[in-house]
Image (tube, rainbow, N blue to C red):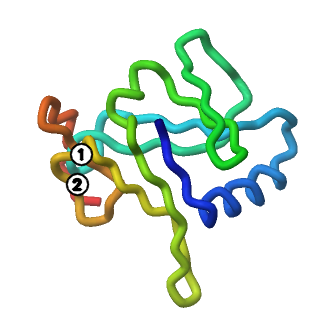
Amino acid sequence: MINISETAAGQLKTMLAEQEVPNMFLRLGVTAGGCSGFSYAMGFDDSESEQDVYMDVEGLKVVVSKDDLRYLNGLEIDFEESGMTGGFTINNPNASATCGCGSSFRTKEEAGNPAAEPC
């Protein structure tokens, strides 16, 4: 299960409404790399696969591949405003370590593929 706060859901719904392609949804995923081994992938998509798991979270269609769900199950996404900036924050209960910028992680079982340069 993925959890998205009301604030983050509101931001995502606004962003989705600005897309020019119909039937877009939020796709969450994981890629190898980043300074800790795995990086988060978050974006809008309109292509579906038999390997996808579909969820309705705060009125948003959220899609995660079955392979990535093991890294993202229990993930919490929030949106925080800080002065003139703001951004999405991620809390991943599966992460045993994260990088300083919060965009990559590793788990107890898997180190991923850490990049040589820091983020």
Circle 1 residue? 95
Q: Amino acid at mark 1?
A: Ala
- SS of the residue under disc 1: loop
| Residue at 39% across, 35% down | 73
Determine whether 64 is above or below 16 in the image: above
Query: Residue 23 sits in which quadrant?
Result: top right
In percent of width and height, residue 116 lies at: 17, 48
Residue 3 % position (x, y):
50, 48
The quarter of the displayed image where residue 40 is located: top left
On the picture, is 45 further left or further right than 100? right
Towards the viewer: 24 or 70: 70
Does 118 appear above or below 85? Answer: above
- Residue under circle 2? 98
Residue drawn at the location 68% of the way across and 34% of the way down:
45
User: On residue 21, which mark appears?
Assistant: none
- Residue drawn at x 21%, y 48% as measured from the top left: 36
95 in relation to 80, above or below: above
